[in-house]
Amino acid sequence: MEPERRRRSAPTAVRHHRLAVYLAAAYTQVLSPSAAAGDYAREVLDEAYRRAFRDNGIRMQQLAGCGAERELITERFTAIRDELADLWRRAEAAAKPGWLQS
């Protein structure tokens, strides 16, 4: 009797349709692309800022360690500062309502 109890029949067309309708409703009610776009953009830009900071920090250490000229180190530092400032501004802009329209 136990094996029969575990045996399940294939889902009917009606049950399959109900599941499809349920999933569609769940996704459209919970996941609103327009509402989540700002949060997602902010997360992506925050991660890009952190990754750029880390990678550029490593490059700066390598430049300093290999005896690069001060002018080259200063030029690279200026470029890094500008890159990080741009990522910062973009992340801040993405956090504001209406950023997508700008």
Image: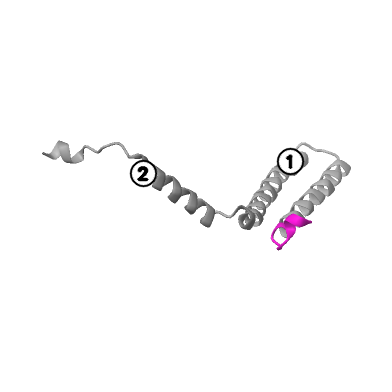
Residue 36: x, y in percent? 61, 55
Q: CA distance from mark 1 to mark 2?
A: 60 Å
Above or below for 67 versus 25: above
Residue 37 in view in this figure: yes
Which mark is drawn over residue 91? none
Residue 88: x, y in percent? 74, 55
Q: Is residue 96 magenta?
A: yes
**Left or right relative to 57: residue 25:** left
Question: For the point 49% across and 49% down, which residue is it?
Answer: 24
Q: At numbered mark 1, what does the secondary structure look like: helix, strand or loop?
A: helix
Kindly identify the amino acid type of the residue bearing the numbered disc 1. Arg
Question: Quick one: quadrant of the C terminus?
Answer: bottom right
Above or below for 60 versus 26: above
Q: Is residue 89 magenta?
A: no
Q: Nearer the viewer, mark 1 or mark 2?
A: 2
Question: For the point 70% across and 48% down, which residue is it?
Answer: 53
Which mark is drawn over residue 14? 2
- Quadrant of residue 15 within the rendered picture: top left
Crowdedness of circle 2 by 10 Å Cα count: few (<14), some, many (20+)? few
Residue labelled with disc 1: 59
Query: Who is closer to the viewer here, 83 or 69?
Result: 83
The part of the chain drawn in magenta is 93-102
- Quadrant of residue 34 within the rendered picture: bottom right
Residue 70: x, y in percent? 86, 44
**Left or right relative to 30: residue 40:** right
Look at the image and name its color scheme. Answer: one colour
Query: Who is closer to the viewer here, 69 or 21?
Result: 21
Kindly identify the amino acid type of the residue bearing the numbered disc 2. Val
Query: Who is closer to the viewer here, 30 or 73?
Result: 30
Question: For the point 70% across and 63% down, which residue is it?
Answer: 97
